[in-house]
Image (tube, grey):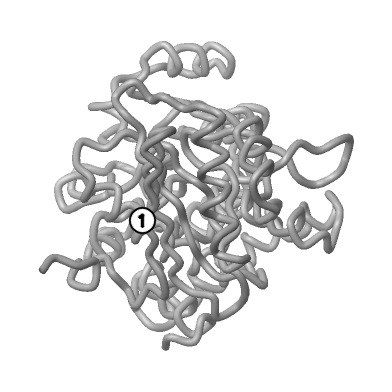
């Protein structure tokens, strides 16, 4: 019998739910990794997978990442994730979103959802018609809430600056070359922040038109997805999908810093060691990209305003500096240091 328990990415997940509603076409996996610090929080990803196994692996990896992310951000939340399996046409209907909301509500608050890849604020409004355990809803004025993307972008930008200061001794990005992988919401925010500070950008995306549009907006240069990982630059910023850093791609890197917003950038734990061995400073992804969940948490708990969200996001750089300092002292790579910190925080040391 094949079960999730035997998969390499299963990490003592507390719950895994497979929900099907044939009437509306919903197929969703909700993975709860840990509720040690509070309800498991993490967005809903809407994605088409070639094989269902890929959806399960994504749910397992992403939910574990959310446990680590929320813990390292100092939030009173556990980690979870939902993966809605889209058909080839990416068909998404209100009925499907309502059914998803009912599935979330059926967990009685053990899981709180929000936006992730393929989902937006309008989708969350539909989901909220069926459950209260949802965040990322429309905001007004300076209130918290809304699209978490800009908050993620801000945290990644501040993290890049911290990495540049640590590795290159520079206080800003003026004149530095950033190789940006991705041209979606988070990548766009990072690019605009970096451009405003005088950085030079090379931008790649599987959708070439999106890369060209962002390059036009920032005075950058569009490059092919095949080129972006081997460009000579000051910073590689992976801001698309995960597992882009592996034995082959790391060997071809020509950068002193890797700092980006994508989840699960390392294909294996050994790839953190490979970066470290090459003297490339790595900003652990779930630490640097925590800005969105910080906003979501503040919205859901109602414990602060936009000023507090900004203060909490600025704390990302403090955590990164702690990781790099311990890495230097211990000789372990930053990814391993961050994992050990997070495991202690969720009671799994």
Q: Residue at x 73, y 60 (%)?
A: 312
In this view, 224 is above or below 130:
above
Q: Position of residue 61 (x, y in %)?
A: 35, 59
Q: Residue furthest right?
A: 141
Residue 60 placement: quadrant:
bottom left
User: Which of 302 and 123 lies nearest the eye of the viewer?
Assistant: 123
Give the residue pinned by disc 1: 18
Q: Position of residue 133 (x, y in %)?
A: 66, 56
Neighbor class of circle 1 (other Cα within 10 Å; few <14, some 14-19, many 20+) is: few
User: Which of 150 and 314 lies nearest the eye of the viewer?
Assistant: 150
Q: Residue at x 41, y 39 (%)?
A: 26
User: Which of 346 and 335 lies nearest the eye of the viewer?
Assistant: 346
Q: Position of residue 63 (x, y in %)?
A: 43, 61
Q: Residue at x 32, y 73 (%)?
A: 11
Left or right of residue 132: residue 330: left
Q: Residue at x 54, y 48 (%)?
A: 160
User: Which of 339 and 113 lies nearest the eye of the viewer?
Assistant: 113
Q: Which of the image's four quarters has the C terminus?
A: bottom left
Q: Is residue 169 visible?
A: no
């Amino acid at each position: 019998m094949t079960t999730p328990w035997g998969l390499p990415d299963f990490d003592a997940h507390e719950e895994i739910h497979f929900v099907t509603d044939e009437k509306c076409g919903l197929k969703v996996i909700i993975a709860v990794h840990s509720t040690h610090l509070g309800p498991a929080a993490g967005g809903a990803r809407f994605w088409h997978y070639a094989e269902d196994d890929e959806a399960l692996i994504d749910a397992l990896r992403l939910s574990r990442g959310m446990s680590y992310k929320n813990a390292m951000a100092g939030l009173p939340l556990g980690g979870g994730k939902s993966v809605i399996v889209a058909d080839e046409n990416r068909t998404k209907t209100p009925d499907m979103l309502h059914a998803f909301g009912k599935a979330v509500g059926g967990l009685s608050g053990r899981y709180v959802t929000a936006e992730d890849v393929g989902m937006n604020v309008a989708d969350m409004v539909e989901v909220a018609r069926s459950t209260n355990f949802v965040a990322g809803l429309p905001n007004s004025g300076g209130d918290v809430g809304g699209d978490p993307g800009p908050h993620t972008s801000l945290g990644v930008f501040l993290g890049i600056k911290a990495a540049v200061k640590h590795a290159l001794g520079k206080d800003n990005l003026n004149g530095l070359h950033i190789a940006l992988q991705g041209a979606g919401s988070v990548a766009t925010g990072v690019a605009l922040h970096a451009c405003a500070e005088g950085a030079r950008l090379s931008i790649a995306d599987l959708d070439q038109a999106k890369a060209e549009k962002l390059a036009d907006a920032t005075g950058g240069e569009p490059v092919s997805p095949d080129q972006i990982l081997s460009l000579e630059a000051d910073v590689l910023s992976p801001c698309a999908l995960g597992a882009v850093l592996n034995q082959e791609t790391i060997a071809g890197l020509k950068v002193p810093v890797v700092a980006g917003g994508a989840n699960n950038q390392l294909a294996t734990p050994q790839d953190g060691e490979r970066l470290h061995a090459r003297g490339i400073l790595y900003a652990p992804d779930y630490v640097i990209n925590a800005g969105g969940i910080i906003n979501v948490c503040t919205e859901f708990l109602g414990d602060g305003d936009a000023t507090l969200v900004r203060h909490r996001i600025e704390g990302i750089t403090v955590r990164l500096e702690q990781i790099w300092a311990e890495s230097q002292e211990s000789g372990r790579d930053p990814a391993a240091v961050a994992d050990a910190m997070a495991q202690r925080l969720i009671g799994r040391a």
